[in-house]
């Protein structure tokens, strides 16, 4: 991960460390979504569409995720890292399509990865993602999420849910959740900071050198080490 010398958004460091600090600030890098054979291409342009009905909807999924994160923060010191990890793991695994997100992070090289290595990559990236949330959402200072009820639909059927991370004082941080429906379930497949900066594009940039030099096994080892470091 490319780290900054100072917090990107110091007004709410506890809550936004994961959501902002993980992004490499290449503000105009396009979002990606897997195409045939695991290749990636820019996400389609937004199309005008009504909001998705309430219930088991993109908005409901994002709201559940945000509520779980705030709950973990409020109980953070009492739970400790391992307690937060266990508390968040079911929600994150349900609300995020971690296998697809792994595939997007790997990019076109996914088609060259063996089934065994694919399974290992998904497991390692999933464990790292859950640990990262548990590490960053560790305390509470009055922050809240405001989830917008109106969504934006894309031409390929994906949906963006807009949220604002509101600190006790200072400016809100805007976060867009890119959602995709698979097997009758809406799940997050990427998160965009200020609407333009893709978390997965930043992850791909971060991991590309390791993947090129050491292959899938090298990236699995790196992710496992990062996960272990987060628990310290």
Image: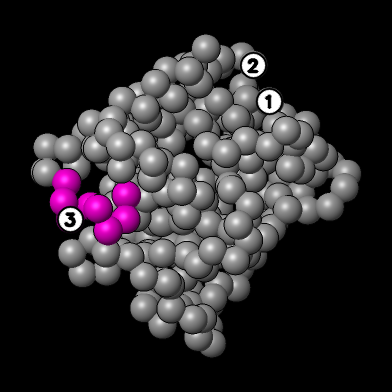
Which dot, 1 or 3, sits closer to the camera? Answer: 3
**SS category of the residue bearing label 1:** loop
Residue 111 x %, y % = 17, 55
**SS category of the residue bearing label 2:** helix
Tell me, yes or no, whether the two marked residues, 2 and 1, touch with CB atoms within 8 Å.
yes
**Residue closer to the observer: 62 or 106:** 106
Q: Could you say which quadrant of the image residue 167 lies in?
A: top right
Q: Which residues are magenta?
A: 106-113
Q: Classify 219 as above or below 106.
A: above
Q: Residues within 10 Å of mark 3 (few under 14, many from 20)?
A: some
| Main SS of residues in magenta | helix
Q: Which residue is mark 2?
A: 77
Question: Residues under labels 2 and 1: Cα distance?
Answer: 7 Å
Question: Residues under labels 1 and 3: Cα distance?
Answer: 40 Å
Q: Which residue is mark 3?
A: 111
- Residue occupying the far right of the picture: 169
Residue 60 in sight: no
**Residue closer to the observer: 78 or 220:** 220
Q: Residues within 10 Å of mark 2 (few under 14, many from 20)?
A: some
Tell me, yes or no, whether the two marked residues, 1 and 3, touch with CB atoms within 8 Å.
no
Q: Which residue is mark 1?
A: 139
- Residue occupying the far front of the picture: 213
In this rendering, position of residue 17 left or right of residue 127: right
**Residue closer to the observer: 76 or 214:** 214
Q: Earlier in the sequence, mark 1 or mark 3?
A: 3
Please check the rendered image and state whether residue 57 is part of the magenta-colored stretch, yes or no. no
């Amino acid at each position: 991960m490319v780290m900054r010398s100072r917090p990107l958004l110091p007004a709410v460091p506890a809550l936004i460390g994961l959501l902002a600090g993980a992004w490499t600030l290449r503000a105009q890098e396009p979002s990606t979504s897997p195409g045939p054979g695991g290749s990636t291409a820019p996400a389609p342009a937004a199309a005008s569409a009504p909001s998705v009905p309430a219930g088991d909807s993109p908005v409901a999924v994002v709201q559940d995720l945000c509520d779980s994160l705030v709950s973990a923060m409020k109980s953070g010191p009492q739970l400790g890292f391992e307690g937060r990890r266990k508390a968040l793991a079911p929600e994150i695994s349900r609300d995020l399509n971690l296998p697809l997100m792994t595939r997007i992070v790997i990019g076109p090289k996914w088609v060259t990865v063996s089934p065994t290595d694919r399974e290992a990559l998904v497991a390692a990236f999933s464990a790292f993602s859950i640990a990262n949330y548990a590490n960053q959402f560790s305390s509470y200072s009055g922050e809240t999420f405001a989830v917008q009820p109106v969504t934006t639909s894309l031409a390929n059927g994906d949906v963006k849910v807009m949220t604002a991370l509101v600190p006790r004082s200072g400016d809100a941080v805007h976060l867009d959740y890119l959602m995709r429906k698979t097997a009758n379930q809406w799940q997050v497949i990427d998160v965009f900071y200020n609407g333009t900066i893709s978390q997965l594009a930043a992850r791909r940039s971060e991991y590309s050198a390791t993947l090129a030099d050491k292959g899938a096994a090298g990236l699995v080892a790196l992710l496992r080490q990062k996960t272990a470091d987060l628990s310290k």
